[in-house]
Image (spheres, rainbow, N blue to C red):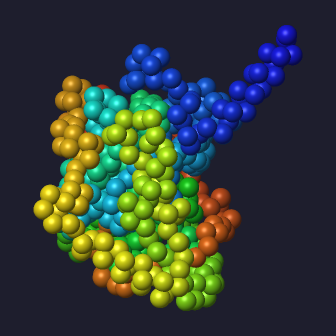
């Protein structure tokens, strides 16, 4: 009997070890008495101990639209960040590219700063964290939108929507980090992992100029394994710069320099990247990446909706639904897409052919943060950074294999501070996002 019990425990441990990105069976929500204070699961706490991560150390959130992944990175005792959790995004609407205006159903892309005020324990979608859109970059470039969240319920109209089980964990990560003194959590919302292969595959996108700007921040994180300091000037992002004076989002950038140690590491990283990019472009000769529509993404995960409420609307991964095709096949697919859009039936069919607001989208208009304390304050569209307007280019996206570009082993040579520069702000006081620039950049603490 004892052997049978031991075997059962080992079997359950094995099953739980692989459920980090699909949490539907990890938590019985009916047994959660206080979702706002629900502790992180024991399996994650054990992993944090193994990685030498203090329970309340700072976190960073990374989103990759195309892959449909959300990652939680957490600071270790040496102040570098390591990935502690990864989730499949249940639903995101629109296509690759930034959010530009209210109603375009685009999920935002860029660098955002989340404060305790962005946590919404009273969301209609179980729990929610406001993305901070529009931030200073968005505002400087005339971009509009509101109530863009990371939330539960798996239904999106411009949000990054998770399952309720997933958002329960993600919310707990943020709550614990704020309790530990972290004043702002960085959200990096990116179109895809910005490897040489992926950048080559999307090199002809109309968004490539914007993505090249985001890639600078992505590279800084890959090299330092620390969230980059983000500022906005000349209506564009700048990362990890020593700046003379106070930058203004719309005005010319003041004099600024990159710290020498960081500049050297970035130069080495970029040298290897350019070599990998050149090889990727050669490999893509004659091939184009077909980016799927939202409907095509939904089709590949239609079986996930079976037996669930109609509002539950997973959208699937662009990476799974898209494909590499020859140029003539790509043109045929695009023509077919345009043909479908141009042929709504007459009469009542005309109205039904237009995509209406989802249950999530309609209710999101009313989903405000409750002003009942530092963690339930009203929605603040704060944030430090954002994206830039792109130059319209050829709509064809060139394709590549998804071999990860491995950065050189230079990151370890970059010094890190002993104290945690992202912590020590009281969670009892909601920080004004406009003061983000005033905190001392991490390289000045070396």
Q: Quadrant of residue 150?
A: top left
Between 332 and 281, the one nearer to me in the picture: 332
Q: Nearer the viewer, residue 34 or 19?
A: 19
The reply to whether residue 324 is in sight is yes
Image coordinates of residue 413 in percent, x first then y, are 65, 61
Picture residue at 20% right of the left edge, 37% below the top:
368
Position of 212 compared to 77: left or right? left
Quadrant in which residue 371 is drawn: top left
Q: Where residue 325 sits: x, y (%)? A: 53, 80
Vertical order, 145 against 364 (above or below): below
Tell me residue 421's x, y (percent). Answer: 45, 45
At horizontal 23% and vertical 35% (from top left) the residue drawn is 369
Q: Position of residue 395 (x, y in %)?
A: 37, 81
**Camera-side residue of 257 and 176:** 176
Q: Is residue 60 visible?
A: no
In the figure, is residue 170 to the left or right of 287? left
Taking 290 as reference, is 432 left or right? left
Q: Which residue appears at 42% of the width and 78% of the height?
A: 333
Q: Where's the N terminus, which quadrant?
A: top right
Query: Image point 77% across, 26% down: which residue?
Result: 10
């Amino acid at each position: 009997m004892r052997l049978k019990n031991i075997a059962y425990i080992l079997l359950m441990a094995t099953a739980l070890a692989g459920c980090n990105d699909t949490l539907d069976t990890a938590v019985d929500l009916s047994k959660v008495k206080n979702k706002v204070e629900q502790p992180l699961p024991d399996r994650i706490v054990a992993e944090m101990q193994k990685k030498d991560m203090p329970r309340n150390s700072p976190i960073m959130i990374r989103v990759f639209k195309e892959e449909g992944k959300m990652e939680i990175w957490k600071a270790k005792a040496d102040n570098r960040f390591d990935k502690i959790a990864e989730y499949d995004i249940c639903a995101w609407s629109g296509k690759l590219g930034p959010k530009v205006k209210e109603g375009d159903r685009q999920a935002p892309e860029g660098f955002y700063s989340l404060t305790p005020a962005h946590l919404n324990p009273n969301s209609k979608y179980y729990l929610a964290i406001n993305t901070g859109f529009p931030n200073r970059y968005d505002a400087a470039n005339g971009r509009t939108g509101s109530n863009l969240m990371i939330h539960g319920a798996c239904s999106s109209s411009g949000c990054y929507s998770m399952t309720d089980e997933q958002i329960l964990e993600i919310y707990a990560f943020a709550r614990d980090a704020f309790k530990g003194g972290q004043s702002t959590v960085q959200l990096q919302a990116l179109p895809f992992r910005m490897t040489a292969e992926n950048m080559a595959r999307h090199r002809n996108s109309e968004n490539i100029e914007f993505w090249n700007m985001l890639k600078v921040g992505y590279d800084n994180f890959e090299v330092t394994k620390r969230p980059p300091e983000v500022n906005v000037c000349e209506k564009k992002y700048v990362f990890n710069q020593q700046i003379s004076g106070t930058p203004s989002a719309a005005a010319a950038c003041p004099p600024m320099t990159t710290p020498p140690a960081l500049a050297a590491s970035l130069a080495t990283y970029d040298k290897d990247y350019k070599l990998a990019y050149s090889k990727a472009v050669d490999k893509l000769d004659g091939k184009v990446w077909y980016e799927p529509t939202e409907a095509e993404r939904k089709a590949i995960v239609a079986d996930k909706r079976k037996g669930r409420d109609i509002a539950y609307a997973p959208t699937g991964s662009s990476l799974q639904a898209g494909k590499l095709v020859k140029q003539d096949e790509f043109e045929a697919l695009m023509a077919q897409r345009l043909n479908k859009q141009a042929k709504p039936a007459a009469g009542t069919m005309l109205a039904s052919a237009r995509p209406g607001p989802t249950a999530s989208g309609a209710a999101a208009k009313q989903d405000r943060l409750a002003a009942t304390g530092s963690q339930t304050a009203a929605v603040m569209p704060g944030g430090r950074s954002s994206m830039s307007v792109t130059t319209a280019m050829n709509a064809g996206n060139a394709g590549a294999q998804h071999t990860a570009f491995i950065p050189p082993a230079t990151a370890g040579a970059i010094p890190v501070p002993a104290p945690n520069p992202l912590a020590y702000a009281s969670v009892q006081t909601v920080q004004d996002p406009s003061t983000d620039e005033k905190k001392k950049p991490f390289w000045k603490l070396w």
